[in-house]
Amino acid sequence: ITQLWAPLHFLGFVYREIKHSLADMERMFTLLNVGAEVDDHPAAQTLAAKQVAIRFDCIGFGYDAKRQILHDVSFDIPAGHTVAVVGASGAGKSTLSRLLFRFYDVGSGGIRFNGTDIRELTQDSLRAHIGIVPQDTVLFNDSIYYNIAYGRPGASREEVIEAAKSAHIHDFVMSLPDGYDTTVGERGLKLSGGEKQRVAIARTLLKNPPVLIFDEATSALDSRTEKAIQTELFDIAANRTTLIIAHRLSTIADADTIIVMEGGRIIERGHHRQLLTAGGRYAEMWRLQQESELVEG
Ligand code: ATP
């Protein structure tokens, strides 16, 4: 299998691009198992948990030694809760999710799952507990069925269809002449942004992980699709420990905790209402967004 994938080393730049954008990194890792910058500790434990409480404990991190990106970042996501991270571009939001998936190891501090530092867990078992709905879902050039079933190898046809129904994509699939056998992806039927995101949601529902990372798309879907997908996300986030990387504040007003980042530091945290009352950076971002939505009508 190593030989089979050897040409992909040559395509390292593609890999880095994908890695950078967090798009489908789950899939890249599972498929390739190459290029990992972190190793399993010889005595790594296998995580097997139905519920996961996450702690970011005094995290310091830089992609290279010359430039520190995160400074002393600490927060908790209690089991089953949702924490949303907001902040200007480059503030370090996506970096948090890359560290959570253990793409990179932290420079200082530690990330804990139910009290155990994730460096003491096997990467496979860590990643089996995390589902990602990426900004931009890259589909395989294969059937819709395959693209959903990929979430959990061994799932039955009923389970795949059940997941598609929960992600509200089943009716759309059934409207296609070839139904679940329709080929999608670059060389097949091109799906819209919303449809692709629903495939990703169905895949994640099938995987049924206790931890969810949702990287909100920067490119806006039409507002009706966006609202519908938000509702679905809150449904799948219920009872899962969820980290939302948010680009639009309207998505996250219901989150248990909102974290505002600037320059790699947490500058504010609280519920939506608390943050509005506090009249700081979040309140300002909210006001600006309301204004721009009025302008856009
Ligand atoms: P956005 O809202 O634009 O997605 P963000 O808050 O998610 O931004 P990050 O992607 O976490 O920001 O990036 C934080 C900083 O780290 C940026 O200055 C970025 O240039 C830098 N950075 C991100 N990825 C890498 C990388 N692979 N190598 C080097 N620097 C990186």
Image (cartoon, rainbow, N blue to C red):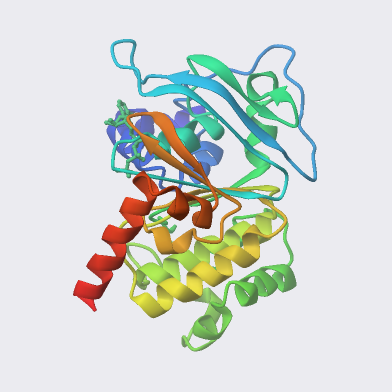
Q: How many marks?
A: 0
Relative to 38, residue 294 above or below: below
Tell me where residue 55 appears, x and y as whole percent: 64, 31
Most foreground residue, 253 or 123: 253
x 49%, y 89%: residue: 175
Residue 44 visible: yes
Give left or right: position of 72 versus 211: left
Q: Quadrant of the C terminus?
A: bottom left
Q: Quadrant of residue 264?
A: top left
Where's ligand 1: which quadrant?
top left
x 72%, y 60%: residue: 155
Residue 183 visible: no
Most foreground residue, 74 or 170: 74
Most foreground residue, 255 or 149: 255
Tell me where residue 189 appears, x and y as whole percent: 36, 73
x 46%, y 85%: residue: 176
x 47%, y 34%: residue: 96
Tell me where residue 211 appears, x and y as whole percent: 65, 46
Tell me where residue 67 appears, x and y as whole percent: 30, 16
Most foreground residue, 66 or 7: 66
Q: Quadrant of residue 202?
A: bottom right
